[in-house]
Amino acid sequence: MAIVTFGEILLRLTPPNFARIQHTSSFDAHFGGAEANVAAALSSWNQSVRLVSKVPTNPLGNSAVRFFQSCGVNTRSIKKGGERLGIYFYEQGAGLRPSVVEYDRKDSAFTDPAENEFDWYEILLGASWFHWTGITAALSPSVLSQLRKALKAAQNHGVKVICDLNYRSKLWSKEEARETMTDLMQYVNVLVSNEHDTQICLGVEVEQSPNTEEYYRSLAKTLKDRFKFDAVALSVRESEIVQIPDVIHRRALLLDSRDCSNGYFSHKHTYRPIEDIGGGDAFTAGLIYGLLHEESSQDALEFAVAAAALKQTVPGDVSLASIEEIRALAVNGKGAKVVR
Amino acid sequence: MAIVTFGEILLRLTPPNFARIQHTSSFDAHFGGAEANVAAALSSWNQSVRLVSKVPTNPLGNSAVRFFQSCGVNTRSIKKGGERLGIYFYEQGAGLRPSVVEYDRKDSAFTDPAENEFDWYEILLGASWFHWTGITAALSPSVLSQLRKALKAAQNHGVKVICDLNYRSKLWSKEEARETMTDLMQYVNVLVSNEHDTQICLGVEVEQSPNTEEYYRSLAKTLKDRFKFDAVALSVRESEIVQIPDVIHRRALLLDSRDCSNGYFSHKHTYRPIEDIGGGDAFTAGLIYGLLHEESSQDALEFAVAAAALKQTVPGDVSLASIEEIRALAVNGKGAKVVR
Amino acid sequence: MAIVTFGEILLRLTPPNFARIQHTSSFDAHFGGAEANVAAALSSWNQSVRLVSKVPTNPLGNSAVRFFQSCGVNTRSIKKGGERLGIYFYEQGAGLRPSVVEYDRKDSAFTDPAENEFDWYEILLGASWFHWTGITAALSPSVLSQLRKALKAAQNHGVKVICDLNYRSKLWSKEEARETMTDLMQYVNVLVSNEHDTQICLGVEVEQSPNTEEYYRSLAKTLKDRFKFDAVALSVRESEIVQIPDVIHRRALLLDSRDCSNGYFSHKHTYRPIEDIGGGDAFTAGLIYGLLHEESSQDALEFAVAAAALKQTVPGDVSLASIEEIRALAVNGKGAKVVR
Amino acid sequence: MAIVTFGEILLRLTPPNFARIQHTSSFDAHFGGAEANVAAALSSWNQSVRLVSKVPTNPLGNSAVRFFQSCGVNTRSIKKGGERLGIYFYEQGAGLRPSVVEYDRKDSAFTDPAENEFDWYEILLGASWFHWTGITAALSPSVLSQLRKALKAAQNHGVKVICDLNYRSKLWSKEEARETMTDLMQYVNVLVSNEHDTQICLGVEVEQSPNTEEYYRSLAKTLKDRFKFDAVALSVRESEIVQIPDVIHRRALLLDSRDCSNGYFSHKHTYRPIEDIGGGDAFTAGLIYGLLHEESSQDALEFAVAAAALKQTVPGDVSLASIEEIRALAVNGKGAKVVR
Amino acid sequence: MAIVTFGEILLRLTPPNFARIQHTSSFDAHFGGAEANVAAALSSWNQSVRLVSKVPTNPLGNSAVRFFQSCGVNTRSIKKGGERLGIYFYEQGAGLRPSVVEYDRKDSAFTDPAENEFDWYEILLGASWFHWTGITAALSPSVLSQLRKALKAAQNHGVKVICDLNYRSKLWSKEEARETMTDLMQYVNVLVSNEHDTQICLGVEVEQSPNTEEYYRSLAKTLKDRFKFDAVALSVRESEIVQIPDVIHRRALLLDSRDCSNGYFSHKHTYRPIEDIGGGDAFTAGLIYGLLHEESSQDALEFAVAAAALKQTVPGDVSLASIEEIRALAVNGKGAKVVR
Amino acid sequence: MAIVTFGEILLRLTPPNFARIQHTSSFDAHFGGAEANVAAALSSWNQSVRLVSKVPTNPLGNSAVRFFQSCGVNTRSIKKGGERLGIYFYEQGAGLRPSVVEYDRKDSAFTDPAENEFDWYEILLGASWFHWTGITAALSPSVLSQLRKALKAAQNHGVKVICDLNYRSKLWSKEEARETMTDLMQYVNVLVSNEHDTQICLGVEVEQSPNTEEYYRSLAKTLKDRFKFDAVALSVRESEIVQIPDVIHRRALLLDSRDCSNGYFSHKHTYRPIEDIGGGDAFTAGLIYGLLHEESSQDALEFAVAAAALKQTVPGDVSLASIEEIRALAVNGKGAKVVR
């Protein structure tokens, strides 16, 4: 059974060695995109994954396809055509300097699909999951129209739908996002998000005091009930007493109808990441993998959180951690030492 | 007296070490653009140069301005605003593999100037030369409209106008080019071009057998007479008996009303370039410098050809050769040995 | 219909920037191997290609598979297991300094397949061509045994067999090579080679004076008749009057039963390569493609020679030239200029 | 109104990737110098800045000038001549290994100005501030003589003088420093320093127990009173309970006659820097900018400390942080998250 | 008096910039090996060191020898011959991702010495110390046989023997290790190890509760008594209350018959290493140096621990810290600030 | 028997990838120096070589020593002390752009030896050859004084002296060079030079028409007779009919008293070098090696010329070609093909 994901592939250009865009004399090149990152992670874990996208008929388009092929992604549903490949410039932060993302993605090939660009019934044939994020919904009316077709086809095919709200303020306003996303939730089985995006995109708020376990449990329950999700996964913001510069804490909550019905919190992973990008996508990929293959929902969540933490140890948008590496971290809650 | 040039600045991204775009994992970054290259060369030779352009208010825009400031260009007429910086991907050819230029310049900040974006009377105050190329004319109607304003202001101010036809098939059709460029020639004092572009843009052909000195002399004369230019400079295509791979030959003809009235052919420079880009722009810059500072038109032409040849010995769009280096090559017709 | 190729994948390590192995502080990494290179080229031209090989279950093995997946090769017949990935160190020559190849490939995973490692009847199902080279035959008795199984299966399935003799003195003696290869020719339909390897591996010599067209024609005819090949392709050694350092000449002869029955010589391509490696493999890949898709045997040969010449313009073992680029060179016999 | 700064430009050579000088095979190149760094920072914030210096007439001298031009510095007062550009080798520390600075700056072009090398009355025309540090005073008698001329001219022109004591033990003895610097304080309006340098260069000590706020307040008051400064800014050494390796704390005190008359302590910034160099210079530049443009002295100080902290997040001697970035950090006391 | 060390030299290949082996396009090259690292460190401290080893007669073998020559090691006892140089791939960990060591060292030149490859009596002439580790014992029967010869010769010559148990699970089983190592301890004067390896290789355990000072004292005493060592040095595992990601703590215990007869614990060094490899070897080298040159056993131990900590601040297997740098850290227990 | 060479070691800094010094953001680092290059080449060919020099007591001095140790040079006579290591910036030419050498070597450690810095009698004990070049003579009076001592000691010890005139116009005037060098010729047994330097330094001219074999023969004879040299080796300038850009021709003449008494011309090697530097030094090293080990003077000369040609195929000042590689080129007069 295949996993289908629908979204844009971007060329990411990053100055090496913490240089700023204003001063760099070269850029490292990576390919990514929220949905494409999920595809790459899942296929690197031997899942059958179809990436539905569109890239231009030029060397950059070819290179993008080559990259996802190297990960084992089925790229037959990546159409060729249109004007250009979307680009984003990513400047790696350091110390107190935040990372910078500068989009140059307007009028990309992906944003202008033909009315019949994608044959969703064929694409979803034999699929078990369909994955999308709020970015796809935000990109253009014609992409949104394709997304609606896909979601209806998924519903008809009995394909499970998983969505990460992924609000991007540079792509649409809060009002636009809320109107569209609230409506699309009818097709979604599993929601992946956080308190910030659920507030903006779905208008959901709860009364408990913020940053407590009760708060996250209540938020997840409210979401699950209101939108009739099968499951809700939320990342949890930690507030620490001893602040260590550059160190982040990652933890998540899963609420589903099986064995996490009261909400299950994962281990907290504490680490210095070497990249900001792609952690959330690795989490979603890990959750899909976990729900398909791990023994319990709790194990699925631990797999997802560990996958996200390990993603942030490699440069580039895409997770390179193996199932064994992720499980090792998921089980003992900390990284292994060098083995020799 | 200042030299004013009007055109777009592009970010150039080049895979290092002859890699192909499809396989590279990084890009070297340079800034260029036909008119900007002329500005950079002339200011590196201590000329007062104003570059009139527009870049976005983002790190790439800042970086572009920084680069031309480092060359000494007066960047006060580079406006900030608009959507994005135009990009081109340049893949360096090797052996029998041609270089590839892949444009991603649509909807750039430069192509959409406001009606009153540039105050041409102020900009041209105290200027002796105004330089532009056919690329600027081709980019958009609003840029063309600014160009017309500039040309009229130049005419009124008594500023000499020098134009390189620079036909780019990816920007406009032959018909569009011919209609526009033929009309704009009324403002031009000095034309820089070659047989290919004059045929396309100005519809000028001559009867002599191609590739002979007579042919080029006749072409130059016809152009000069028809459009009432003060001077015409043409690059000359050489056909060699012994073909040496990767070696090019550079030579040019200047016809003016002073001492080149019968047309003067420069030395022929034979060399292996390390880059294809920017040779023509260095030629134009060299010609402006030469006409201003060299003793004779012949010396001016030799300076221009030597500047072009030396440009092709450095990576990037911009000439880094000094006046002394160019004169040394212009005089003895060949490169010096290592001095120590 | 698929093309199947059977051979070892090697990690190639090359000091950058013409450094010598003795002095380098880093190595550029590429993956290659004669048969794998053919697979990569053909799949980059949208052919369905199955690479039959074996790599170790470690990050290098994974990386090798990733690379050929990026080219679009079907890697499902690449088995995992065994000790190590074969390595070769490649030092790029310069001036009068020859390139150096230092093998470290002994006891690699590929050289020790299990008796039933490959299910050749399944692998060759739906295949039109089977490709191998003398390197595979030389690596170990167990690999040779697999090769014999594959060849018999191909014969039974009616799959065409193409072989490049590819003699490697570091792998076996001339006597061993001749005994084995002469025997294996019974399964071969198309032979790709040169005068040096046919003399060593097949003991074929002809009387004509060397380096003449007659000599090559006669050699091809003798080979075709003696071993009942459908076709023979030979590279042709050129002797030039004006020797230009670093410049090579590439030309080939094809003799087949269709329209090249008297032997057809390709254009001669003259160029400075930027790499020595992989030209022959690109030739073979081009020949297979050409025989499948070009209109005549002559066009097929021109495609093959142009593919080989273009391969030598990129770093790494694998051709990155597109069908369009190869055809452009095959047709006009010379490289295009930069297009913009 | 322009800001004038007078000091040496050095080429800095740094082994990449934490390599030691003894083992590196390459060096990253940057240009810097205490006063030049102040110039670069201020002009990147759109201040009109004149850098008064001297570099040799060779490619390194040109390159140094190009760099400061790229920052927007007015380089017309950088004279050309003399022997060589001063160099320093900077080895980045790691873990418990300290950074190493190895000077090779003797007999540089800057250290031997002609008697009338600089026309200080012209240079200071239209200037509001003159900046120098103790390094300039220490370099050579002839530089010191120029400095005295400059200070007297500044006094006559009513140009405010700001000085950072910047004691360098490798340039002069404590005795020499104290004699010279104490004397030069008569020209200084604003002093920037720390407890270590004020003790050495000005012989000022106070009785309070070290490392307390009272200590720093008392030290600043004593300095301000004794030398009749308008303002004194001191960096404050923090002693922490939990020591986190590689993390530094930055805080400062400003005492002036306006609204900081009782001494104001800035926020403390806690972070892992990626470079040791240039923090103090960014502080001084930030202070000048802050005193010119921020609403209160307190805001000026916060701007200066934030500028210093952000400088240490980029490789190279020079701050690349924008006014907006610095203000964001100055206001909320911590770095932003990635914005997208 | 010379120090002799006997062990294999390996080529280490490491992806740069935290890339994973699966994704890298290049490898940084270093040479190392437990015994060779000790040799390099000691000779960089001006000790006369003979490295006894064997490398192939190829560019990699030459390059390995060149590297140790650059450190000042006497390489006359490095024999040339055999098949290949052993390789290991080292992937640098980050965050929660552990480092990976992937060996490719089988059938290396070193593992197959001739019966009379090394003339131990000549080699040990004039030597004061002989150093080896458990890796050498594990590599092959013929290497073990050479090791036994060396140990007997050392015993006869009165050369002190120092051994680091260095258990490597990929080279031999616990049972093999215990049988061989227990037997070889009869030749050893000074043991360097930790609780993990002494348990595996020598079967020594003690009753005290783990991770207490008593535990380590008792373990050292038991070892010293049972095997009649002159001295035992153990690294000490620290358990910290506040865990800071990426930070390690290094401390050791020395028990000898002179002034550390009750066991002396070193300072604890707390730091973020930039590499995992080679710390233990630098400790051993530091201990040998310390025992030879420092005034007391305590000073020797502090020198050893500081050497180990500083090793982990440079990329590569080999320590580059000078005696002065190590002593500075050994004395004040913390790293210096940048000196200028 | 050892070969002794006396000269300065310089740090060479080169922009990578043909960048110009004005634009580079990094420099590749090499160590060289005419005499040191000879030492490195000879010891890489297993000769016992002592390099007599002086470097500062800093990381650069250590690094210089490390480099020559890696080549196998005996560095015990390299003294530590003085101010700085001499530097030269080397910009690689391309096309018609010449290479640039920018010296920054004044007041280096080497130029100021103490009166008794070197104990020449001990240094020359057991030596068979002493090598120096005109650079050493030109550097400073105190170096010249040491050189005279060395030459007298060599004369007394019966050590053969070989000198390359190596005139450097940036170090001394023609008059100074001629006065000093003419005088020092009394100590020289073998002269290595060319027509340009012999004219300047020794004032020798001959009547034959330039660039003929007769001219070079006559020049060598005149030199040999006038200064009573045992042998004279001259490089020969070739004038070619077909000029191929970037290609050089290398050929030399040897005149000695044994079997080259009428002068022997070497093969002419024609090639594209990848570096200009160090060819002459490799020639001298090759000549010393050849005279010691090759069967005839003719073979010695061929070895020298081939060594020089191969040097120019590697980056850096020092030859890395092996004896086998040089002999292969010396014998067949052209480079080998890739061997595998």
Image: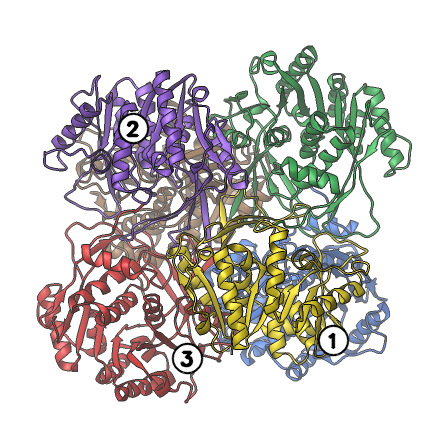
Chain colours: A red, B blue, C yellow, D brown, E purple, F green
| In the rendered image, the vertical position of residue E305 relative to residue A67, given as above or below | above
Q: Measuring from the top left, give residue F290's x and y in whole percent.
A: 71, 29
Badge 1 sits on which subunit? Answer: C
Q: Nearer the viewer, residue D78 or B40?
A: B40
User: Label 2 near label 1: C-beta < 8 Å?
Assistant: no
**Helix, strand, or loop for circle 3?**
loop
The crowding category of the residue bearing disc 3, from other C-alpha atoms within 10 Å (few below 14, some 14 to 19, many at least 20), is: some
Relative placement, left or right, of F199 versus D316 is: right
Q: Quadrant of residue B223?
A: bottom right
> Are discs 1 and 3 both within one chain?
no
In this view, the residue in front, A317 or E301, is E301
State the CA–CA distance, disc 3 to disc 2: 64 Å
Using the rendered image of the protein, determine whether residue E336 is visible from the camera's viewpoint.
no
Whether callout 1 and callout 2 share a subunit is answered no
Give the residue type at disc 2: Leu
Q: Which residue appears at 66% of the width and 71% of the height?
A: C229
Q: Position of residue D260 (x, y in %)?
A: 23, 46
Q: Is mark 1 on a helix, strand or loop?
A: loop
Q: In which quarter of the image is the N terminus of chain B?
A: bottom right
Q: Is mark 2 on a helix, strand or loop?
A: helix
**Chain of the residue where label 3 is placed in the rendered structure:** A
Quadrant holding the C terminus of chain B: top right
Q: Which residue was labeled with disc 3?
A: A77
Q: Is residue E41 left or right of residue F47?
A: left
**Mark 2 — residue?**
E184
Residue A186 image point, x, y percent: 22, 85
The residue pinned by badge 1 equals C261
